[in-house]
Image (cartoon, grey):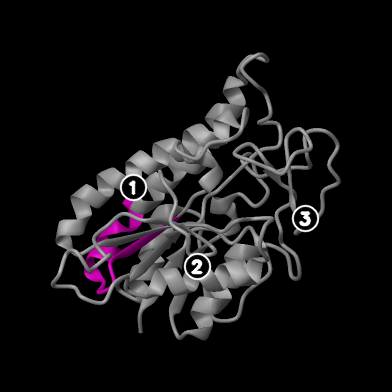
Amino acid sequence: MEAVLLTRLDKAFDRKLAEAFVREGYRVFALGAERAGGCGAGAAIAGCEGGEGGAGAAIVGCEGGEGGAGAAIVGCEGGEGGAGAAIAGVTTLPGDLAEARAAVEKEAGKLDIYVELSDERNAADCFTVRDGLDEALIRGLYDENVLRPMATLEAFITLLDAGIGKRLCFIASAEASINEARGVSGYGYALGKAAMSNFYQMISNKLTPSGYSFRVYDPMHGQIGAEASAEGALNYFIRRRGTEGEDPLRDDEARLVFRDAFAREHAW
């Protein structure tokens, strides 16, 4: 049985994705809430200008707009059952990375698919170039969206080496794309995602020759329902791209591709 690790179960999307992997017959592991932090430092809060929060609410823009790189996802999106509720078929791991790794090694001996779900925003990330930078907020988002994912992957990489799938999946946002940026704020979130884009490329350069493949996905929070987005992610994460592996012009698997919930490819 193929084994998959989800690094968070905070949002409705995370939980729907976990359920979809269970349905498809995967052995599913998820890091505990004490590691993910629940609605912690990097988690979203109600909108900057009094947006009315609530689990599962749509994205609220920093200045009442349609969202953007700095938009806040209101609430933890726990929805039915909440972020801490158990999911049938999912093994919840300890929050400590060493203990979590040991548990997966004992239970499965390897990992085939790794899904990094960190995509933390903060509604206070609304300052503009005229306001001055909130260094503490930026550092907090950087820790959540960059340093934490890097440390987590480092903890589990040898189990992925032992697996057959060797697939690394990451969550991103088209709004944080350098080529597609349209926002005027949200620096903390966008800076972290730009750093992760570089990280994806570097580890792709290093690991692709040894059989690894990559998926980068925008769940389009607030624009598409969590269940539909999770189904799109599952389809993207478990299938091979391209059908002619011997022809580099017809096979898409070796490319580092960034797609959204509608399967559209985005620029970095």
Quadrant position of residue 252: bottom left
Q: Quadrant of the N terminus?
A: bottom left
**Residue type at tag 1:** Tyr
Q: What span is colored magenta in the figure?
A: 154-170
Q: Residue at x 64, y 59 (%)?
A: 11
**C-alpha span from label 2 to label 1:** 18 Å
169 drawn magenta = yes
Q: Residue at x 76, y 70 (%)?
A: 80
**C-alpha span from label 3 to label 1:** 30 Å
Pointer 2 and pointer 1: residues touching (CB < 8 Å)? no
Mark 2, other Cα within 10 Å: few <14 / some 14–19 / many ≥20 = many
Q: Nearer the viewer, residue 63 or 204?
A: 63
Relative placement, left or right, of 14 versus 82 is: left
Q: Residue at x 47, y 60 (%)?
A: 264
Rendered position, 42 above or below 244: above
SS category of the residue bearing label 2: helix
Residue bearing the label numbered 1: 200
Instruction: Report the residue that reaches farthest toward the front.
Output: 249
Q: Residue at x 26, y 71 (%)?
A: 163
Relative placement, left or right, of 222 versus 245 is: right
Residue 233 — which label?
2
Q: Earlier in the sequence, mark 2 or mark 1?
A: 1
